[in-house]
Image (cartoon, grey):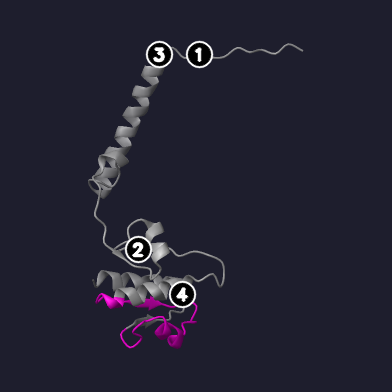
């Protein structure tokens, strides 16, 4: 059996033309995204100036250091993900306690209807100041969270 080791080699002119077409298509896509969502909605990472991001401590020095900014970034959506009983609620409550220490107003959307106020208080949460919602559906939870976020 004879193997054919022929390779298609692109000439630099062909490659240049192909790259120009790709760049033209990319520029058009970026322009469309900018028109739809505003300047800065998509850019090369090297073009963006370093941002000074405020953070809220997680209550765990090791985690704060690992995150690189001293905690969770303020004003961002953070997803805490993990298996059952892995500490997701504990972490969320610790962040609530830290935010309250700095004068923050916090809300806890308890989709599982399982928040233990005694445990929350032991973690340092000012439960009398904590806003809580126990929605019946995921859609209701998102709507409540969105309304609270928009309130400031």
* SS class, disc 3: helix
Is any part of residue 28 visible from this angle? yes
Question: Which residue position holds label 3?
Answer: 12
Verify CB contact (< 8 Å) between mark 2 and mark 1: no
User: Relative to residue 17, is residue 87 depicted above or below?
Assistant: below
Mark 2 → mark 1, Cα distance in angstroms = 51 Å
- The residue drawn where x is 37% and y is 72% is 95
Upstream in the sequence, badge 4 or badge 1? 1
Mark 4 → mark 1, Cα distance in angstroms = 58 Å
Of discs 4 and 1, which sits in the foreground?
A: 4
Q: Is residue 125 shown in magenta? A: yes
Q: Main secondary structure of the magenta part?
A: loop
Mark 2 → mark 4, Cα distance in angstroms = 15 Å
Mark 4 → mark 3, Cα distance in angstroms = 58 Å
* SS class, disc 1: loop
Of discs 4 and 3, which sits in the foreground?
A: 4
Question: Which residue position holds label 2?
Answer: 71
Q: Which residues are magenta?
A: 100-129
Mark 1 → mark 3, Cα distance in angstroms = 9 Å
Upstream in the sequence, badge 2 or badge 1? 1
């Amino acid at each position: 059996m004879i193997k054919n080791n022929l390779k298609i080699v692109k000439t630099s002119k062909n490659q240049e033309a192909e790259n120009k077409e790709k760049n033209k298509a990319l520029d058009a896509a970026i322009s469309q995204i900018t028109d739809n969502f505003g300047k800065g909605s998509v850019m090369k990472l090297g073009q963006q100036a370093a941002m000074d991001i405020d953070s809220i401590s997680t209550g765990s020095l090791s985690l704060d250091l690992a995150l690189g900014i001293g905690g969770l970034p303020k004003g961002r959506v953070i997803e805490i993900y993990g298996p059952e009983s892995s500490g997701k609620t504990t972490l969320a409550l610790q962040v609530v306690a830290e935010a309250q220490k700095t004068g923050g107003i916090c809300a806890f959307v308890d989709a599982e209807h399982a928040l233990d106020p005694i445990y929350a208080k032991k973690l340092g949460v000012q439960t009398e100041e904590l806003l809580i919602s126990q929605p019946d559906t995921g859609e209701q939870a998102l709507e409540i969270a969105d309304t609270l976020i928009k309130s400031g």
